[in-house]
Image (cartoon, rainbow, N blue to C red):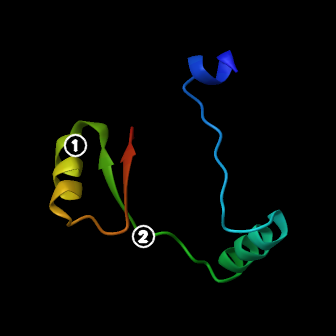
């Protein structure tokens, strides 16, 4: 457990369905070239990203990137 905490890692799961249904969905996504709709902000733009979230103007997901 300590390596997870010290490396700031996390474990998550999904209530969406069984592993088999998730595999089916992921195969569908791959076959149809479906991509998420995200807005990418650099870490130095975090204030703008937070303002966008707070104002309700964020579309779907905001992603912070270190690149």
> Residue 56: percent from the left, percent from the top?
20, 65
Q: Residues within 10 Å of mark 1 (few under 14, many from 20)?
A: few
Residue 3 x, y percent position in the rendering: 67, 18
Q: Which of the labelled discs sits on residue 21, or is there none?
A: none
Which residue is located at x 65 percent, y 83 percent?
32
Which residue in the protein does label 1 denote?
45
Q: Position of residue 27 (x, y in %)?
A: 75, 74
Q: Residue at x 71, y 80 (%)?
A: 28
Is label 2 in a helix, a strand or a loop?
A: loop
Q: Position of residue 8 (x, y in %)?
A: 54, 26
- Secondary element at image label 1: helix
Q: Nearer the viewer, residue 66 or 16?
A: 16
Residue at point 26% right, 64% down?
A: 58
How packed is label 2: few (under 14 Cα within 10 Å), some, or many (20 or more)? few
Classify the position of the C terminus by image quarter: top left
Question: Where does label 2 land, which residue?
Answer: 37
Horizontal side of 1 relative to 46 (left or right) equals right
As drawn, 56 above or below 64 = below
Which quadrant of the figure has residue 23?
bottom right
């Amino acid at each position: 457990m300590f390596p997870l905490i010290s490396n700031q890692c996390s474990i998550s799961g999904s209530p969406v369905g069984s592993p088999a249904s998730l595999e089916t969905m992921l195969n569908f996504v791959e076959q149809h070239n479906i991509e998420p709709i995200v807005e990418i902000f650099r870490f130095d733009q975090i204030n703008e990203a937070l303002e966008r979230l707070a104002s309700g103007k964020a579309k779907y997901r905001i992603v912070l990137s270190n690149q």
